[in-house]
Amino acid sequence: MNLRSSFRLFGFLFFVAGSGFAQTVGALGNGTSSRATSLGGATVATITSPLEAMQSNPAGLAELNGRTADLSFTSMFTTGSFTNSVSNDGTVAGFAGAIPYGAVAVPLGSGRFKVGFSVAPDVTMNADWKYMDPPGGINGTTYGLQQNHSSILGLRYAGGVGVVVTKKLSVGGTVGAIYNRNTLQAPFIFQQEPTLAGAKVLLDLHTAGTGWNSSFGALYTPSSKVKLGLSYKSKTTVHSHGDATGNARQQFDALGATTFQGDFGYDAEVVTKFPQALSAGVSWQAHKRMRLNLQGNWINWSNAFDSLPVHLTNGTNADLNGFVGSDALNDVIPVAWHNQGVFGFGVESPMGEHLAFRGGYSYATNPVPSSTLTPMTAAILQNTLGTGVGYNLGRYSLDLGYQVQLPASQSVVTSSLLSGEYDNTKVNVAIHTLTLSSRFHF
């Protein structure tokens, strides 16, 4: 198979992953391949597939053998509860999503250089909750029992190259286009809009856009038993566009504006930033039947999820436009996430020539402050366990990984969000991930 055929294979992966993404939301744990899922994400120093190289450390492209492709499929399931001032039985949807994705790696010339292509989720966060809307907004507005859905999704279409510099050192880099889609379907309280701050409306917002990022990595092998890995991924900024529709009937009634039209529509722009990240790790062949992997990550959320600007233009509600004095609204949602540290540990144990068992654990600091926490931003999971098995037969291999992000709880006493709806609330959540990966040499 020549390079042109490899591009065709990448095009197929592009179509499959993109089609699945168009219908899917979810929340990924540590790692995108089933092997990474099993090892608690600790793969930066030991790369075995194009997907791991493109998503974890592009220097690993240079060390892959021959032409290789892999395809993965992930399913996610969520459990959780939410308590607020009017109800203690808030629930989250059990099925969080499923998505296919993949990658291809091809040598150039003598094989010192290898190129890679991938379509894989970079950032996916989803919350689909159902709970009673507590009194809030202006004059205690409530919309009763509501489905609260929020998602910030990113799919990365990337190309990369890995180079063997010496027998002990390989380096690599990637450039990727991030397709970002944002959804918010929930009661929404304006936070910083000069005229409407504190007002509550029902909002249905959908935007999509594209941004860019890059990654760089290195692998160093000081001895036959030890590998060191280092990688960096840059920050991404996306200006996404779409529409925002909704209804403000209850809020208008609470204000005594009973003659105002309730329905509204706007053109919408959301500015979303995904964080830069730095990873470092070591892999040690401690025994012929045991490889140990350690990894640490630093994720710069504080410069990405500090606030979420939302710009609304070309409003269709004449009454609302007259009240505000404009057909445009500009709001900024405070998020104020902290930087996050993640530590991962994984063990691989081959059993004979074809079979391998894996296990891993990771601990992450919680980036979400209580002051801005809601069920829809509850990325509060800290302890993760993974396990899996891999089977290899000649040119083909099949891996299955399971990961559970153990239940985590966080309470809010006094929220910094307007109207006090999230004062004295508590959220509990856990995520289960099942990933199947197949790899073949062609």
Image: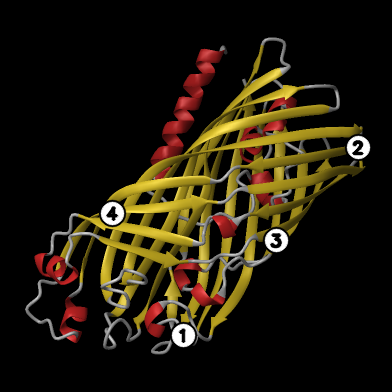
- SS type, badge 3: strand
Residue for point 69% across, 37% down:
57
Task: Say which quarter of the image contains residue 108.
Answer: top right
Q: Distance between the residues labelled 4 and 1?
A: 29 Å
Q: Which of marks 4 and 3 is in front?
A: 4
Sequence-wise, which precedes: disc 2 or disc 3? 2
- For disc 1, the marked residue is 423
Sequence-wise, which precedes: disc 4 or disc 3? 4
- For disc 4, the marked residue is 268
Sequence-wise, which precedes: disc 4 or disc 1? 4
Identify the image quadrant of the N terminus.
Answer: top right
Viewer-closest of 117 and 208? 208
- SS type, badge 1: loop
Residue for point 59% across, 45% down:
436
- Horizontal and vertical percent position of residue 370: 55, 76
Residue for point 61% across, 40% down:
55
Residue 377 horizontal side relative to residue 138, left or right: right
Whether tag 4 and tag 3 are in contact, CB under 8 A, the answer is: no
Sequence-wise, which precedes: disc 4 or disc 2? 2
Residue 287 horizontal side relative to residue 320, left or right: right
Whether tag 2 and tag 3 are in contact, CB under 8 A, the answer is: no
- For disc 3, the marked residue is 385
Q: How far apart are marks 4 and 3 (CA)?
A: 40 Å
- Amino acid type of the residue tagged 1 in the rendering: Asp
Q: How far apart are marks 2 and 1 (CA)?
A: 53 Å
- For disc 2, the marked residue is 225
